[in-house]
Image (tube, rainbow, N blue to C red):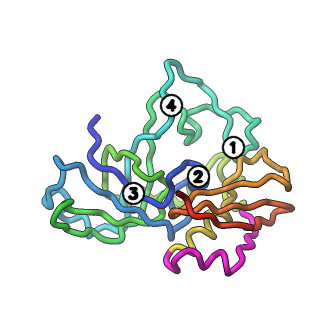
Amino acid sequence: MKIIAHIHTDFPQKFGIPRQSGLVESLKGTIVFEPEYRSPDAVKGMEDYDYLWLLWKFQVPEKDNWSATVKPPRLGGNTAMGVFATRSPFRPNPIGLSSVRLEKVELTEHQGPVIHVSGVDLRDGTPIYDIKPYLPYVDSHPDARGGFAEDVKDYSLQVVFPETLLNIFPKSKQEAIVEVLRQDPRPQYHDDPERKYGVAFAGHDVRFTVRDGVLTVFEVVELK
């Protein structure tokens, strides 16, 4: 497997990244190819599509053995499910799959074709193995069952983000960080209203607490 590109996003750490692609449509990413693959011919026709599939490498510690079951955070971290019935990163092969919206393909002088996408769920610097077009006539199954994920898909928090703190971010990133927080970055089994959390996003640490379904941001600190 050859790494063909890396994606650049506003998430330097895993904590806070949406659990699925497309949950926060305003999250942006930029895909830069490795020098070997920087040919404009390789992306010819790409802009005729609205969405792309990304196959990528999970950045998790490598293990010598694997577990047949995992405990999804959205089920409270207590219920075991088969690894192949989940999208857990802890798999025999650390391969991720994301459907992202194609914003544009930019032809640059030094980096070749650069792909701008949105709705990302990837950490900054994530290696990309492959890019394929999303084909709605075969890839979309609106009547398909969604397993246990259907039971938790609408879960979200109310977010209180003081304007003085929100304005630390440029306007282009404000909607994204609010939506990230609304998805509740915490492990589902955390329920301590006094506990303080921090999401690293766009060069800042966004610190918050959660009480009775309300997430309140109390500080935004620039990352050094």
**Structural distance between the alpha carbons of marks 1 and 4:** 18 Å
Which labelled disc corresponds to residue 8? 3
The quadrant of the rendering that contains the N terminus is top left
Answer with the quarter of the image where residue 207 lies: bottom right
Residue type highlighted by circle 3: His
The answer to which of 119 and 191 lies nearer the viewer is 191
Residue, far front: 224
Residue at the image position 73 percent from the left and 61 percent from the top? 208
Foreground: disc 1 or disc 4? 4
Q: What range is drawn magenta here?
A: 156-172
Q: Earlier in the sequence, mark 3 or mark 4?
A: 3
How far is disc 2 from disc 4 in space, using C-alphas?
A: 19 Å
Kindly identify which residue carries mark 2. Answer: 19
Task: Identify the amino acid type marked 2.
Answer: Arg
Q: Which residue is mark 4?
A: 61
Name the side, left or right, on which 135 lies relative to 193: left
Going from the N terminus, do you reach mark 1 or mark 2 first?
2
User: Of marks 2 and 4, which one's residue comes earlier in the chain?
Assistant: 2
The residue carrying mark 1 is: 73
Question: The residue tagged with tag 4: helix, strand or loop?
Answer: loop
